[in-house]
Amino acid sequence: MDWEATPAAQQGAAMGETNLQRSIRERRRALRRAIGAGLRKIRLEAGLSIREVAAAAELDWSHLARVEAGERDLSLAALVAVTAVLGHDPSIRFYPSSGPRVHDRHQVRMIEALLAVAHPRWTARLEVPVYRPVHGVIDVVLQDPQAGEIVAGEAHSLLQTVDAQIRWATQKAEALPSAHGWPWTPLYSATPRLSRLLVLRSTEAMRGLVRSLPETFRVAYPARPTDAFRALTQPGVEWPGPAILWVDLDGRATTVLHGPPRGIGI
């Protein structure tokens, strides 16, 4: 069955979408277009017309034409039938993008602690969507218009896949110029300097993970945490480049550490 917007979804679109709703809609459109283009490619390679394929797969040819054009969805059963007619097997692959959009319960406290110690020279933007060349949402963007600095920040209390997280954080930061309103201020005389920040919760598991991959984290985030903390909290201090800041959660208290936890060299 093809997906159609429910009245509630249509009303939500009219009243304004959340970032998550917009992301889901855009990903659906991109996937629909990719499937349609892929089907058209292998159909043409097979030298078959849409009518021939649709008849063999027991589908309406006009619907299949709209699927190839990226205008309609195709059910899994119909996708299997069409690809079987064309001598192919479909497959589905899941890969990391922006990470879970329902965040862990500690992330909000970590971002709150970061904003609490940030010097007023930094303007913060939360949950910033980016669109090109990748789609995703950056947890927090810090901007110092006078110094021409923009820092894309990600906060994690637990890292599942280090390489994927580092790669995705880098891709989202590089996509910041596609964010709505970029660069958000007319004060820049040149292209602002763009950097990255990784905010980690100081737990035994997280510290052990970082200790087990020291060179990976050093190459990805070479700046010293102490220098990043100074740039975050003091006026006139240049942002040192990609850096890690650590946050300690102890009961109700949440503290941004001035440097790395004991035993961590980065």
Image: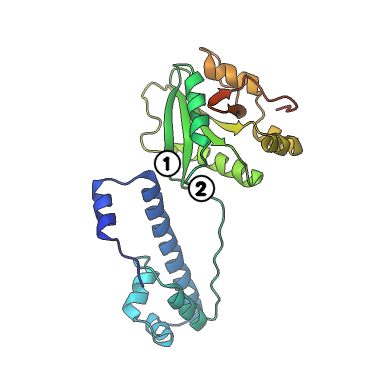
**Cα–Cα span, label 1 and label 2:** 14 Å
Identified at 24% across, 59% down, the residue is 7
Callout 2: few (<14), some (14-19), or many (20+) C-alpha neighbours within 10 Å? Answer: few
The quadrant the N terminus occupies is bottom left
In the figure, is residue 150 to the left or right of 18?
A: right
Q: Amino acid at mark 2?
A: Pro
Q: Give the residue displayed 53% in from the left and 27% down from the top.
A: 252
- Provide the residue designation for mark 1: 129
Q: Amino acid at mark 1?
A: Pro
Label 2 secondary element: loop
Give the x, y percent position of residue 179: 41, 38
* Residue 1 higher or lower than 51, as above or below: above
Residue 115 x %, y % = 47, 24
Looking at the picture, tell me which residue is in the foreground, 52 or 166.
Answer: 166
The residue that appears at 38% across and 44% down in the rendered structure is: 19
Residue beneath disc 2? 100
Q: Which residue is depicted at the point 61% across and 40% down?
A: 158
* Above or below, comparing residue 70 to residue 89 in the picture: above
Residue 148 visible in the shown view = no
